[in-house]
Amino acid sequence: MRAVEGPADLARFIDLPYRLHRDDPVWVPPLRRDVKAMLDRRANPFFEHGDAAFFLAERDGRVAGRIAAISNRLHNETHHDRVGFFGFFECEDDQAVADALFDAAAGWLRARGFDTMRGPASYSVWDEFGLVVWGHDKPATLMMGQNPAYYVPLVERAGFVKAKDLLCYEGGEPAAEAAERIERGVALVRQRYGLTTRTLDPSRMREELETVKEILRAGWERNWGSIPITDREIAHIADQLQAVIVPELVPFILKDGRPIAFAWAMPDLYDALRRNRSGAFLPGLLRVLWGVKTRTITRTRILLLGTRPEWRGKGLDAFLIHEIWKRGYARGQRWGEAGWILEDNAGMNAALTKFGWTHYKTYRVYDRPA
């Protein structure tokens, strides 16, 4: 077990999942350049309020596992706790290797005053969050982690217990009767409250991002595990996705011209990356751009929904899902994922169920004493 030091170690840290999962048909190789940028303290704005250490476990001269120990100052300031995190966990099916990785991460966290280790979180709720515990046979989707089933016992035998489950839903075009009922309900909400809609204006991206950030900060402030997203973080995400943003999949609901809710959906770019098994940048990028341009990506991922607190419980969640699906269907989208949703977010889970979507995958966040 040793800490990552220098470019050669970093390359081995990045390479491990491509070797471990190369024959797994549901694992989608991320672009290696994107992974490297995520680990770069100068490029990733997470490191303005956080820190991390990266570790490799070796056996017989090969890398058998990897992990990151993560300190997130914004989380601790928001929740007034001493929770540290582990993330970027990848491991052979070997409990001794997994235990050594978790112990290395826990030691780093203890030395910095943390009493709990939570994860996987790479790095926070705004990144890949949680371990797949149900639905391992379903393909990974954009900005969501994926792991083989054997990771679950590796984690649980190491002493971790459930902290929270995160639910993902899948859906398509509602049946005719349900579609008519939804259409009537949305029309009623629109009329009752005098609401209008518009979509993202790419020519005003800075202002649009400010609106998104404002609604998120107001609407997510009490969510379990949530932390404020910083200006640089949201700009960084937008910069990464700007070339493939589809404005009509980012609807805003307005009251008297003021945005009160929004949703952000994207074509599921992983659909285009699935065959790029090496994670090479240029072939992967060309597949993604071509898929978006030609509308041959038929899967959609709903990344975010945000509603101002005073407008909760008034049917805006279903309104937003309807807007996304109506516009996505016109673009040829035939399957969608919404998630993740906190297991105890009764309103959002009910809205998706009423829309005819089905819970099809569960991610779990774990805790153990550091």
Image: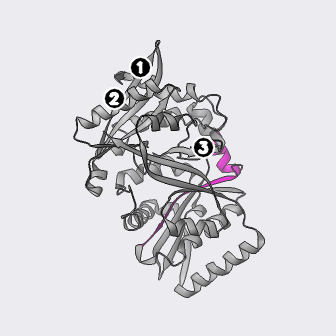
Marking on residue 104: 2
Amino acid, disc 3 = Ala
Label whose residue precedes the other's in the sequence (3 or 1)? 1
What segment is highlighted magenta in the picture? 287-308
**Quadrant in which the C terminus is drawn:** top left
Q: CA distance from mark 2 to mark 1?
A: 20 Å
Asked whether the residues under the numbered discs 2 and 1 touch, taking CB atoms below 8 Å apart as contact, a structural biologist would say no
Q: Amino acid at mark 2?
A: Ala
Where is 154 relative to 142, above or below?
A: above
Q: Residues within 10 Å of mark 2 (few under 14, many from 20)?
A: many
Which residue lies most toward the right here? 176
Work out how far the residue at label 3 is from the one at label 1, CA to CA, in angstroms.
28 Å
Tell me whether circle 3 and circle 1 mark residues in contact (CB < 8 Å). Answer: no
**Quadrant location of residue 114?**
top left
Q: Which residue is mark 3?
A: 140
State the residue position of label 1.
8
Front one among 244 and 102: 102
x 61%, y 84%: residue: 188
| Relative side of 355 to 32, left or right | right
Image location (x, y in percent) of residue 203: 50, 61
Say what secondary structure mark 1 lies in. Answer: helix
Q: Residue at x 59, y 61 (%)?
A: 249
Whether 182 is drawn above or below 152: the answer is below
Badge 3 density bin: few <14, some 14–19, many ≥20, Cα 10 Å: many
Report the mark closest to the observer, 3 or 1. Answer: 3
